[in-house]
Amino acid sequence: RDSGSLDKLCDTLRSRLHEIGEADLVRFMRGMVKLRHTNEELLTALAPVIDKMKSSLSSVSLTNLINCFASFNSTNGHFLKSLLHAASSRASRLTPMSVQHVLTALCRQHGVLESAELHLHFQRICQHMAEPGVAAQMTPIQAVASFSALSKLHYQDLAAAGVLTSVLAGRGSAVVWTWAPSAFFFAHGRPWSLPAEYGVLNEARCLQLLQRELDSSHCVDILQSLHRLDLTSALTLRLAV
């Protein structure tokens, strides 16, 4: 990676911001993140441009940009707050990937945003995740990333957690909403099987899904998330085992 060449490219882009379109802007910012290259002058110049066009950006582009700017700790806090409010206010239109981007950004901005702001964004996003059909569209990778972000900030929303753990168990189309009151609920001979209304968990399918879609680091993230959020159910016990 040649920082000097990257800075020259950033300088060129900064002088032609009025020419760049939405798709190119997202691609460029994603490239900056992948290269882990920060150019303060460009970020400062981009902020008012993106802030002005945020209402016309697609939800996918908006949340991509939020995730990118959250990666740069030097980004103006007020600007990022404005983007986050724009995204969470249209939470009902966010795809699972966009949900992942917003939750990851909120996790990265912990300590910058006030607790009330974080709670508002989490509430909107989690309410959307629990809506019919969302779980069926979510991939295991997206579920792990979203689950990890929520757990790192110790935000427990049982409905959203039900969606995420069901996706990880291969039950995105049949979410399990039932939770046990504590980790000791199954310690006295109570069955680990799912409640009758949820049918039988296909453990072979669950294992195949985890092995195909996730690696060992993802599995560690799942276990840590379950522990941080103190989540216990017949589904999570089988998922953990």
Image: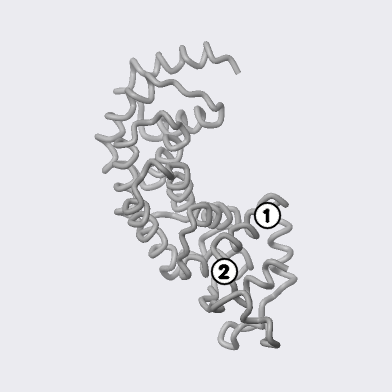
**Position of 61 relative to 194 (above/below):** above
**Position of 196 relative to 161 (above/below):** below
Can you say which quadrant of the picture contains the C terminus?
bottom right
List the residue tagged with mark 1.
220
Report the amino acid beneath label 1.
Answer: Val
Can you say which quadrant of the picture contains the N terminus?
top right
Q: How is the image coloured?
A: one colour
Q: Circle 2 sits in a helix, a strand or a loop, which is it? A: loop
Residue 89 rendering spot, x and y as whole percentages: 29, 53
Considering every residue shown, the one lying at the far left of the view is: 52
Residue 126 rendering spot, x and y as whole percentages: 42, 62
Label 2 – label 1 distance at C-alpha = 15 Å
**Position of 43 relative to 189 (above/below):** above
CB atoms at circles 2 and 1 under 8 Å apart?
no
**Residue drawn at x 52%, y 70% as measured from the top left:** 162
Q: Residues within 10 Å of mark 1 (few under 14, many from 20)?
A: few
Q: Nearer the viewer, residue 42 or 161?
A: 161
Q: Quadrant of residue 122?
A: bottom left
Task: Answer left or right for 159 relative to 87.
Answer: right
**Residue drawn at x 72%, y 73% as measured from the top left:** 203
Q: Quadrant of residue 3?
A: top right
Report the amino acid beneath label 2.
Answer: Leu
**Residue drawn at x 53%, y 59% as measured from the top left:** 138
Q: Circle 1 sits in a helix, a strand or a loop, which is it? A: helix
Task: Answer left or right for 38 relative to 47.
Answer: right
**Residue drawn at x 62%, y 57% as measured from the top left:** 224
**Position of 197 relative to 170 (above/below):** below
List the residue tagged with mark 2.
231
Q: Nearer the viewer, residue 159 or 175?
A: 159
Residue 204 rendering spot, x and y as whole percentages: 75, 71
Residue 30 rendering spot, x and y as whole percentages: 49, 33
